[in-house]
Amino acid sequence: MQTSRTFVKRTRAGAVVKVVREHYLRDDIPCGAAACRRCPLRPDAPAPSLETQPGGAASSLCPGPHYLLPDTNVLLHQIDILEDPVIKNVVVLQTVLQELRNRSIPVYKRIRDVIQTPEKHFYSFTNEHHRETYIEQKKGETSNDRNDRAIRVAVKWYSEHLKKIEDEEKIQVIFLTNDRINKEKALEEGITAYTCEEYIKSLVANPELVDRLACVSDEGKEIESGKVIFPEHIPLSKLQQGIKSGNYLQGTYRASRDNYLEATVWVHGDAEEKEIIIQGLKHLNRAVHEDIVAVELLPKGEWVSLSSVVLQDDGQNEDDIETEEEKENILKTSVSKDMLRPTGKVVGIIKRNWRPLCGMLSKSEIKEARRHLFTPADRRIPRIRIETRQADKLEGQRIIVAIDGWPRNSRYPNGHFVKNLGSAGDKETETEVLLLEHDVPHQPFSQAVLSCLPKMPWSITEQDMKHREDLRHLCICSVDPPGCTDIDDALHCREIENGNIEVGVHIADVSHFIRPGNALDEESVKRGTTVYLCEKRIDMVPELLSSNLCSLRSDVDRLAFSCIWEMNHKAEILKTRFTKSVIKSKASLTYAEAQMRIDSATMNDDITTSLRKLNKLAKIMKKRRIDNGALTLSSPEVRFHMDSETHDPIDLQTKELKETNSMVEEFMLLANISVAQKIHSEFPEFALLRKHPAPPPSNYDILVKAAKSKNLEIKTDSAKALAESLDKAESPTFPYLNTLLRILTTRCMMQAVYFCSGMDNDFHHYGLASPIYTHFTSPIRRYADIIVHRLLAVAIGADDTYPELRDKHKIADMCKNLNYRHKMAQYAQRASVAFHTQLFFKSKGVVNEDAYILFVRKNAIVVLIPKYGLEGTVFFEEKGKPTPRLDYNNEVPSLTVEDTTLCVFDKVKVNIMLDASNIQHQKIQMVLVEPKIRGNDVPANLSTETSSNNEPEKKKRKLRK
Amino acid sequence: KRGLYRKRRGLYREGLLSDDGFRLDGRRPREIRSLRMRLGLFPRADGSAYIEQGNTKVVALVYGPREVRGPRSRSAPDQAVLRCRFSLAPFSGPERRRPRGGEGRGSDLALRLQQSLEAAVLTHLYPRSQIDVYSDGSHCCTGTTAAALAVLDAGIPLRDVVCAGSAALAEGTALTDPNGAEEAAVGPGLALALLPASGLLALVQLSARVPCERLEPVMEAAADGCRELHRALDRELRRSLRERHGEV
């Protein structure tokens, strides 16, 4: 059954060690063809995935039925095409997969997903362990050549093997390779081989695929044509030597948003210089934002400082190298000596971090041209040259493009078209774009995931009740914002015999439905959180769970995880108990409804009295928490009133907070803290907790200075001092000042993060002034809560554990992903609000509003408009206009424009309008109206004049009158 | 030390099991390594055996039963005394190592060997005597099996040939008879000595943390390996006996 072959392998760094590994060759590996009767099939093996009658695209090169067998480079570069549903029946060799894994993990994962999709009919053939396809490395042969030969041997074996199938039509195997030498050798050996391009172009029925071909030119040909613009990249092995010896520095490349000729590199590790400036096209040397690069420092004489010049790359012509040099010279002028910072040049790329990019096509001016430039939405990414025949169709559309390479003689990187998202400015398209740009997984749930859901109609079984308490008799109710369908928390409160109060927080038992390790679990951990956009919600778990089975709706039996305290009337906890339970909520209220019940004297039913008790306790708890130094911060939150038909925003409103909001919040905090204590005491090594680090004192500088300008003192030495001084900081003439100060404080804060208790020793939550904290109360929308639920369930013996739950490295990795997803979800939310604000102002025209100055910058002020909770920047420099005299004072902070001085917290009036001159980057533009600035006259009543006028060009002209 | 740790994590990530269900060396999860064995290599010993399991090579020698040497207090009135020694050859690992003192009689490995053998050897047939077992190899499981074969070769009656095997847990799947690379990646896991005919366990040892709910599949995998080993041994034994003595 098995033959053994031992061979000598690898030497480890340092000591040279001979490693002998066994390598079994087998004769029971099937070829995967459904028509094959010769290959032995194991009883438990899945059905062969290659079709008997290979369907898929008809090729003019090989009209007969055929299977494809690509080599590593084809898979690596042309994965976008291979993922297309048209391409079917592909054999992926183990050799290829192994090479792929070493070269690109993302592509490897993608191809693995494709192999697991049954409709694609991909088959991975373990050729390295097949008796007839295994080959040994010859003397003097590089491992690359050996792998190429192994692939050819496998192709040969396949074509001979398939010939033996007794069928009327013989199935051919087609070898796809872009390597010229490999192809020649294959043809010599009698293998049918094509390059990927030849094959795709032969698919006459699917011409659109050609656009998606990645244009990877042969390395050798590169230099022959055109002028060489960029210096050569140093090969990786030399880079590593250089980094070790300190000649080069390794870092992450960050392109500048405003200036395409400038970038910074953040050096990894603890080098002296953390940030290195790279300036000029040649020094940037084809690095793209987020790449890991190696940098060589320039001699001190050539150091520069970051210029504040805004430069947009708008050159259409490629040969304009001279003008580029002119532009580079602009950067270098007028720099004082002490501002010079370390400057370097990119000598090589350690790792490319290319991802598919959203953006738009800038059509070439030449008619019938196939090569066009693509402008990504992210300004930090250079424009990309793509080849397409459907430019007319793609103009004005948001499209996705992938970068393939950047040859030395090309001004721009080469790429290929991947997908069309829809026309720009369209609401669906823009939502899609912002989801993609923020890396939010938003595809509909796959069949595999949906199959993990419970079957409907669902009811609670005997089995479910095993470790559960029946709490259906309790008077439980939920309080949520209006229109909430994923209710994950409910409360109850009652007096018990000994005079104490029993308070219960009941959280939806999502971990009952999402079992560890299944497809549903994997999908939810990947999503990490539900993302709430203005008009839509990207669920973390399928709707059946989020809005039905897990949602603690009223008058239905639902599974819950309950946290029950016994408290005295001073709201001190006497006993804490956790249990899985079944509950039946008596009412789902909104905050307003609950508030109404508490306030109205006539209502005295069970729900109302328990709400009143809860409210009373919550007030005591809140006071105690604030006395301990918890911060009450403020950030303006906006809510859109949507048109029910068109889903266009018709009104903006800042969120209003009621007493009941803080009541619910108080009990959720308490539950989270109690659970955190429990799981940490039970599992000190791998509890998932949440911490909020204290900000470094320098973060508060801006706040302290701003308060000083209003003759107020803010103490920042501890959270408690900060909270107290914020409470005191009030001005009788300026009631909004306190809110402004709190908004500023929020900006000084650090980001709260999840972490694994075994990997960290600082647990403190600064904002809540709690020594320990976690997330337990929203498992429907946050994955962290599901893990906490599982931990708690194990702690109370209600559920089984599983190995990954107890692996602190796995938990820490998961925390990293969750933190990333939360951050991205937040950004996506903000982007969505910004987009809807734009839509809103598009319909409004120009609006004149009161605003407060939040920050003062060197050439601009940031203002906050309380009515909309909108923040915007007012610039005093404009293109094509004389720059006003600006005088910035860092001490107060204030900015003097001509004769007008603007201080932090000043009340001003601004005009708000939409600047749609750049269709990819529409933005809200603000212009100062009051106080008036000389030379910048703006009529205050502009809104009435131009409200019907939406064209920005005209607006601008009017402003300049 | 950090490098070693990294390497282990690396291998772990790399995946010990491919999507098609093959291990790094091409075996399926429940397959054991290839086996070779010979009996009676050393004419001066009463019994001897040599086993090769994959790249693990073990020699076992048996002297006895013979009179107890040394003080009489060492002997037992009703049974033979098994005295085991287990040593690792200096060239048995990837790097050459110095032989250390801790591997002799009474060491952990020797105790395991002794415990496993005591369950199989019919010691009560030889009161007041001793049997010396020397096992010399790189792996305790293979060492135990080899020792049992050597006892067999010495003509000492056994209840059964003790077959020892191990299993490791990789990403939720139990791997029977892990090789060196696999052990380095996930730890040795579970070692088990089985009397195949009766199904009795002579020894179970967990040397890595195995989650409770996974223990059973891991044990099953190890026992599977032992039974498979037994079949292979049986085949080899019959073949070698045929070679030596003609048809049995």
Image: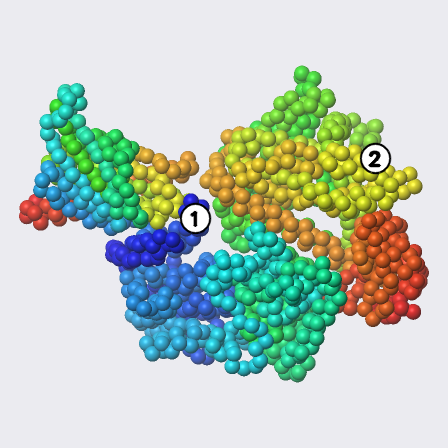
Please give the name of the residue rendered at 68% of the width and 53% of the height, measured from the top-left corner.
A827
Q: CA distance from mark 1 to mark 2?
A: 56 Å
Can see residue A231? yes
Farthest residue in the left direction? B246
What subunit carries mark 1?
B
* Residue B69 placement (x, y as % from top left): 13, 26
* Residue A205 placement (x, y as % from top left): 52, 76
- Eyeballing the image, is A261 above or below A572? below
In the image shown, does B94 or A547 lie closer to the viewer? Answer: B94
What subunit carries mark 2?
A
* Residue A408 placement (x, y as % from top left): 55, 74
Give amino acid for label 1. Answer: Gly
- Eyeballing the image, is B100 above or below B126? below
Q: Quadrant of residue B112?
A: top left
Circle 1: element type: helix
Please give the name of the residue rendered at 36% of the width and 76% of the height, measured from the top-left corner.
A185
Name the image quarter holding the N terminus of chain B. Answer: top left
| A15 left or right of A452 in image | left
- Eyeballing the image, is A764 above or below A884? above
| A35 left or right of B156 in image | right
Circle 2: element type: helix
Q: Quadrant of residue A918?
A: bottom right
Q: Which mark is residue B3?
A: 1
Give amino acid for label 2. Answer: Lys
Q: Which mark is residue A728?
A: 2
In the image shown, does A80 or B127 lie closer to the viewer? Answer: B127
- Eyeballing the image, is A162 above or below A790? below
Name the image quarter holding the C terminus of chain B. Answer: top left
Please give the name of the residue rendered at 71% of the width and 55% of the height, measured from the top-left corner.
A832
In the image shown, does A455 or B205 lie closer to the viewer? Answer: B205
